[in-house]
Amino acid sequence: MGDKKSDGHKKDLSRKKYEKELEKLHAELVKLQLWTQETGLKLVVVFEGRDAAGKGGVIKAITERVSPRTFRVVALPAPTDREKTQMYLQRYVCHFPAAGEIVIFDRSWYNRAGVERVMGFCTKEEYIRFLQGAPIFERAMVDSGIKLIKYWFDVSMEEQEKRFQDRIEDPRKIWKLSPMDVKSFQRWYEYSQARDDMLAATDRDFAPWYVVPSNHKRRARLNCISHLLSQIDYGDVDGEKVELGKRKLEGAYDDSASLEGRTFVPARY
């Protein structure tokens, strides 16, 4: 599982240091994007963890400088009545990548091993069948040519409570706190046992789990992105240097003046 040390003893990075390092990683993610398009890589990245563990922040950091046509984020809502009658994994498979695509699951089929188990949204038989079948399912993914990387974001009890309280007090974040989050807060150890059972059943050589200590958000983002990049043997893609050339001036006219009389957004700032 790599480095098993917690990040609890460390202080978070300064914003200046964080942004400097993130800029370097963004440049590498762009290289990965071009390489993925060139080689036809098919990559699935799964992000799991407790509520407020920092999954959304790292996904945003990964995707903010790359093309959404290559890096596609999938965050599925609760299943519809129709989807509840389907094979459990069916609604996830339709989002899998074609050649030249990277799909990021903000929560995934592992909902069954976490929230569905703890909250009683599935039967015990359905849960057991999932743990038995998930490694077979993921083996089939890998054998089909999909590279699968799975991350579990590990946040402490104290830090999760701090982040939940911050969401309550900040009007910009209150939408992040759902009734389900409150229930998960109250059932800490049930989620811990669900996590332990999930890792024990589905941490395999062909699809291992990587644990990301996430008490410090900035460190967690940089560490996760750096690790993700290290898992793919990508390289530079040769391409012609882009040159703008010269504008064609035929038909030139005062195209700014032609907007006079149109409705403009008020300049309030």
Image (cartoon, rainbow, N blue to C red):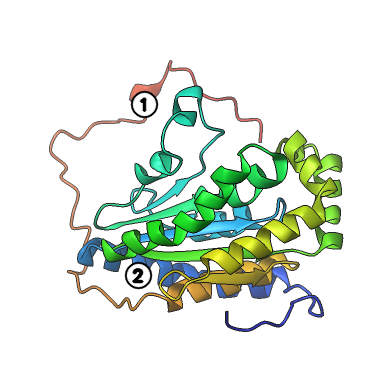
SS at circle 1: helix
- Crowding around mark 1 (Cα neighbors within 10 Å: few <14, some 14 to 19, many 20+) is few
Counting from the top left corner in percent of width and height, residue 146 is at 32, 62
SS at circle 2: helix
Q: Name the residue that disc number 2 marks.
A: 31
Q: Residue at x 73, y 60 (%)?
A: 193
Cα gap from disc 2 to disc 1, whole angstroms? 41 Å
- Is residue 134 or residue 36 the one in the foreground? 134
Q: Name the residue that disc number 1 marks.
A: 257
Q: What's the residue type where badge 2 is placed?
A: Lys
From this view, report whether residue 39 is shown above or below residue 175.
Answer: below
Counting from the top left corner in percent of width and height, residue 81 is at 50, 23
Give the quarter of the image for residue 244.
Answer: bottom left
Give the quarter of the image for residue 66.
Answer: bottom left
Horizontal side of residue 141 vs 222, given as left or right: left
Res 94 label? none
Q: Residue at x 54, y 25 (%)?
A: 265
Give the quarter of the image for residue 135.
Answer: bottom left
